[in-house]
Amino acid sequence: MADAPLTLDRIRADVAEVLYVTPADIQDDTHLIDQGMDSIRLMTLVERWRADGARIEFVDLADQPTVTQWFELLNR
């Protein structure tokens, strides 16, 4: 878990930033790979969240690519 919990809003905002869209364009249950999330963008998020204390692996996020699933993984 991160030092401070990563909220749904924070995860959505970070995802939107790397996909160059607004947070309102990101639905919590949308398959992010279908929205353009690639390995480079995903690794950017992994490193960002690790810097904030999250204990997460690339493969964990790649296997469950929705904001809701990431929220659960990042806050377990």
Image (cartoon, rainbow, N blue to C red):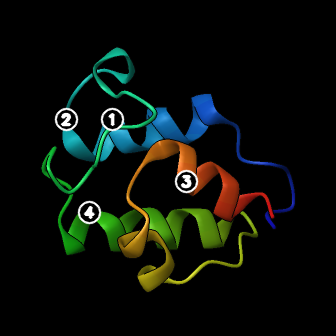
Give the residue type that dot 1 points to.
Ala
Q: In the rendered image of this protein, does residue 40 appear above or below residue 67?
A: below
Using residue 51 as the reference point, say whether residue 59 is left or right of it. left
Helix, strand or loop at mark 2: loop
Name the residue carrying label 2. Answer: 20
Screen quadrant of the C terminus:
bottom right
Q: Which mark is first along the chain, 2 or 4?
A: 2
Give the residue type that dot 3 points to.
Gln
Name the residue carrying label 1. Answer: 16
Give how far apart the Cα atoms at labels 1 and 2 are.
6 Å
Q: Which one is closest to the eye, mark 3 or mark 4?
A: 3
Give the residue type that dot 2 points to.
Tyr
Using residue 2 as the reference point, say whether residue 58 is left or right of it. left
Contact (CB < 8 A) between labels 1 and 2? yes
Foreground of the two, 18 or 26: 26
Helix, strand or loop at mark 1: helix
Task: Please state the horizontal and vertical placement of residue 60, each as a whole percent of the image.
Answer: 50, 78
- The residue that appears at 38% across and 23% down in the rendered structure is 23
Contact (CB < 8 A) between labels 4 and 1? no
Give the residue type that dot 4 points to.
Arg
Name the residue carrying label 3. Answer: 69
Name the residue carrying label 4. Answer: 41
Give how far apart the Cα atoms at labels 4 and 2 are.
11 Å
Helix, strand or loop at mark 4: helix
